[in-house]
Amino acid sequence: MKEYIIRVQRGISVENSWQIVRRYSDFDMLNTSLQISGLSLPLPPKKLLGNMDREFIAERQKGLQSYLNFITTNHILCNYDLVKKFLDPNSYSANYTEIALQQVSMFFRSEPKWEVVEPLKEMGWRIRKKYFLMKWKAQSKERLVLSWADLGPDKYLSDKDFQCAVKLLPSCSHPYIYPVTFATASDSSALVIRMFSEKGTLKDLIYKAKPKDPFLKKYCNPKKIQGLELHQIKTFGRHILEVLKFLHEKGFPYGHLHASNVILEGDTCRLLDLENSLLGLPSFYRPYFSQFRKINTLESVDVYCFGHLLYEMTYGRPPDSVPVDNFPPAPSVSVVSVLESILSSEASKIGMPTVSQLLQTPLFSDVFLSNSEKPQFKIPTKLKEALKTAKECIEKRLVDEQKLLYQHRRLTRAQSHHGSEEEKKKRKILARKKSKRTAVENNEEHSAKHNNSNNSAGSGASSPLTSPSSPTPPSTAEHATF
């Protein structure tokens, strides 16, 4: 059976690449698991006879390449655990559901009042974050959700500060933050318990999905694409901006805004997953905002993510690509005005508004806030300093990543220009001109030598021989080989 060698590269560095070997049957198994997405996936069809013909194999290889391109450019599919395991089996060989269950079991030894009802499989998009439906033993009817996640690349708090910050989450009280019932952390992961929301998230409302359904089934290919009503866009947007402003004023980093991290309670939006920034997890939209150097603070990250969320609320789907310069008709020109200030090409070049400036726009400034609950979140002074330092480290890593991407794009453009047909023609013309010029100079030099020789012989005087100036020797570089 024919095997295909696939070179996989993560990011821009060629050094961060590896090879995997896959058969067509492996692609077929992956494709079967992705059918739940409802997408029309371009896997080349099976062929029982003549499947070893050279022409057929070459054609199938092209088809499989197109299939991989389709998957890796789809933001939801490329984050699916089976896709990650298919492309990078060494990094994703662990069973994270089992690891999470072990951690949860250890927790329950000291907290016997909780009980696991069932794992909530394929809930959420993170491969290293797992969810369980829970209940109190004393109150068996009420359902809760336990989320477990291990550490990410942006975890900069010390273990002590990290555990202190996580345990502080249940004390956070805000009308637009979904309350945490219980939270604890070890030196390698965090565990958070919240009440289970029957209505689901804002994304569930937009996509008219059932909260317990798998992530791929709910959001990859919605049957009906329809945005929210204008009053919902205004109200939900105002609630989200209010809580972002609150977190920024408290010095608490977030950076994880998207429609699945917003719970709905009637006409009120409440933000989820404050623990993500403490864990150092990558943002859902990081592949997008890491391309734009003006998005270099966590506030600008939150504003950019808010732009994506506003687009989704308005049109019922995410943008096809970013930046966006042509917006479809919206319920109000004020919606498009805000979207342009965040997602347009101009915004990516000159910068975006702050959260406070967005609150003052006509779209949100006239929204009446009926909730009178007073926000409370007391963070100790030492922890505030630690959070500030962690925030600066997160921003620095983002800026460093953006610099590398910028340099890579410049190099790629230069190489593309150098290799273009027009540039090749220019170099050929220049080479011919240089060759002609050299030939002329050599002829002139030969004539001058001949004349000098004749003059010397006639006069009997001794003249020094002339020669063209020697070229400067190339600089010598030392090379070390092993």
Image (cartoon, rainbow, N blue to C red):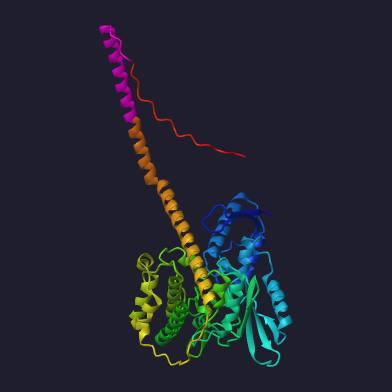
Give the x, y percent position of residue 177.
Answer: 51, 84
Which of these two is toward me, 29 or 418? Answer: 418
Q: Residue at x 66, y 60 (%)?
A: 90
> Can residue 438 be seen from the camera position used here?
yes
Residue 332 vertical position relative to residue 54 in the rendered view, above or below: below
Q: Residue 365: name its quadrant.
A: bottom left
Asked if residue 362 is among those painted magenta in the image, a careful observer would answer: no
Q: How many marks?
A: 0
Quarter of the image with the C terminus is top right
Q: Which residues are magenta?
A: 436-464
Quarter of the image with the N terminus is bottom right
Q: Is residue 60 left or right of residue 231?
A: right
Which of these two is toward me, 397 or 87? Answer: 397
Residue 400 vertical position relative to residue 320 in the rendered view, above or below: above
Q: Residue at x 54, y 78 (%)?
A: 274
Q: Is residue 411 left or right of residue 16?
A: left
Asked if residue 460 is among those painted magenta in the image, a careful observer would answer: yes
Q: Residue at x 51, y 75 (%)?
A: 384
Give the x, y percent position of residue 97.
Answer: 68, 73
Q: Residue 109: name its quadrant.
A: bottom right
> Can residue 327 be seen from the camera position used here?
no
Q: Residue at x 72, y 74 (%)?
A: 102
Magenta span: chief secondary structure: helix
